Image: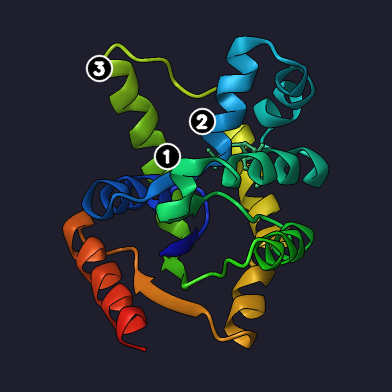
Amino acid sequence: MNLILLGPPGAGKGTQAQVLADKHGLVQLSTGEMLRAAVKAGSEIGKKAEAVMKSGGLVSDEIVIGIIADRIEQPDCAKGFILDGFPRTLKQADALGALLDSKGKSLDAVIEIKVDDTILVSRIETRARETLAAGGTVRADDNAEALKTRLMAYYRETAPLIGYYYANRTLQSVDGLAPINEVSAQIESVLQGVAKA
Ligand code: AMP
């Protein structure tokens, strides 16, 4: 099963991707995590991505498409994957489609986690507070200024993907305002529908 989780920052994509990965043995592919690892490692990609990530902007399509193209080729992805945070632009969505076609793979579902815009800021602030309280390191882009840029990037660049995947009939929506386990249950029922189809 190959899935995309779509939704604004703070919608719960990462949380749900992890639940799905554990439950179904799928690989979670988070471009944000991969880029943060690249920044930490000081690789060429990390050096290119660091400043733009910190500001909350989008890393170039070329870089993230390259990362995903390499990653999807790895043997562990054969059993299925969940894309979390990719694609984020129409160009990335087109590139993903072409990439999957060329490998004889396809998407089983694109799951939109719908949330109320007003909740996102408080969710992200809570995430930063909880990370701090647990002695962790708060993401460089979990602050008010970067969050504004991330939300703008989402509405400008990523939200059109909802229409894109609706048009090609892969879009399914779940209520991201529900408690975490309820959102997971809604996603499960989407997957059961896909499996039956
Ligand atoms: P995330 O962990 O998904 O919130 O991603 C953190 C940051 O990484 C984003 O704000 C972007 O700067 C960058 N990023 C992650 N995925 C992508 C992508 N698919 N396209 C462009 N930039 C990305």
User: Residue drawn 47% across and 52% down?
Assistant: 78
Circles 1 and 2 in contact, beta carbons < 8 Å: yes
Q: Quadrant of the N terminus?
A: bottom left
User: Is the residue marked by circle 2 packed among few (<14), some (14-19), or many (20+) residues within 10 Å?
Assistant: many
Query: Where, by quadrant of the figure, is residue 187 drawn?
Result: bottom left
Percent of width and height locating residue 17: 37, 50
Which residue matches tag 2? Answer: 142
Determine the CA span between mark 1 and mark 2. 7 Å
Which part of the image, by quadrant, shows the C terminus? bottom left
For this view, does 9 lie left or right of residue 99?
A: left
Local crowd size for mark 1, using a 10 Å CA cut-off: few (<14), some (14–19), many (≥20): some
Image quadrant of residue 28?
top left
Q: Amino acid at mark 1?
A: Ile
Residue drawn 32% across and 48% down?
21
Query: What residue would you read off at disc 1?
Result: 124
Provide residue 193's location: percent of width, then percent of height: 31, 83
Tag 3 secondary structure:
loop
- Disc 3 marks which residue? 134
Identify the secondary structure beneath mark 2. loop
Q: Is residue 104 above or below residue 11?
A: below
* Callout 1 secondary element: helix
